[in-house]
Amino acid sequence: MRQIILDTETTGLEPAQGHKIIEIGCVELVNRRLTGNHYHQYIQPDREIDAGAIEVHGISNDFLKDKPRFADVVDEFMAFIDGAELVIHNAPFDVGFINHELRALSMQWPLLEDHCAVLDTLKLARTMYPGQRNNLDALCKRLGIDNSQRDLHGALLDAEILADVYLMMTGGQSSLLLESESTEQQTTARRVKSLSSKRAPLKVITACDEELALHQERLDNIDNHSSGACLWKKIDSGVIH
């Protein structure tokens, strides 16, 4: 399964008012593993950036003067995401801007959702954490993800952070190894040292009633926030063996 975590930065909030994309950042997951493959591009929008937008992402008009236009990079961008599932936080915003750019080109490009499947992590987060703040910073804090380097928004940085958030929200990363690592490196990383048969048996300490109660309370909380998807409760009830 190939997924592309995607984020954009823009000149403002509404493409209908002539606002444009100025940065696209993507990172690739294959079978839930970061491959190290990414796409990153700054774009000349041929218009001024709103002052409020500059405060968010810090990208200036002067910085973009010598950057290519969307029409110059569309082939490479669409080829990179082709056939993948796009994972986007607040997908209608980014998809709306990209579709606006595609419609403005003389060539007949399909709409983004006709080119790729789209998964909205904001919609997913609202289902998992109803009534709570679910922006990227709030999710990082809730899931224990370090985003201290995120002083300003940036498309590639935010895509990298969203990849961590998405993997944590959907069950964790199956492997921290990159696809590009050799078989020998992966074998070494997975090698387990056997314990000596002469080693004294490990002491087993059972949980007390208070700890068991806290554990059950934690499982109930997970179950409530995941719409009944807590696997431990299903195992305890005999649904899963």
Image (cartoon, helix red, strand yellow):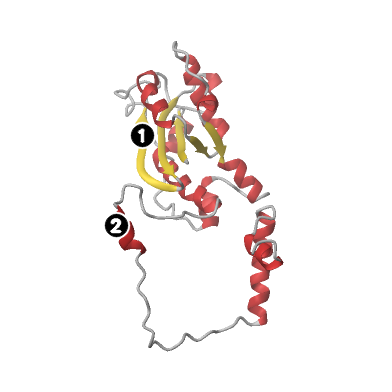
Q: Whole-percent x and y of residue 118? A: 55, 34
Residue 29 horizontal/vertical position (percent):
43, 43
Q: Relative to residue 61, is residue 106 depicted above or below?
A: above
Answer few, some or many: residues within 10 Å of disc 2's Cα (few below 14, many 20 plus, some between 14 and 19): few
User: Which three-letter amino acid code belongs to the residue tagged 2?
Assistant: Gln
Circle 2 is placed at which residue position? 185
Q: Is residue 71 above or below residue 134?
A: above
**Residue that label 1 marks:** 40
**Residue 66 in which image quadrant:** top left
Q: If you read the primary sequence from the N terminus, does the residue marked by circle 1 or circle 2 appear first?
A: 1
In this orientation, does residue 183 appear?
yes
Left or right of 125 in this view: 165: left
Q: How far apart are the alpha carbons under marks 1 and 2?
A: 28 Å
Question: Residue at (51%, 47%) from the top-left corner?
Answer: 166
| Image quadrant containing the C terminus | bottom right
- Give the vertical position of 110 relative to 148 (above or below): above
The residue at the point 68 percent across, 75 percent down is 213
Query: In the displayed structure, does residue 14 sit left or right of residue 230?
Result: left
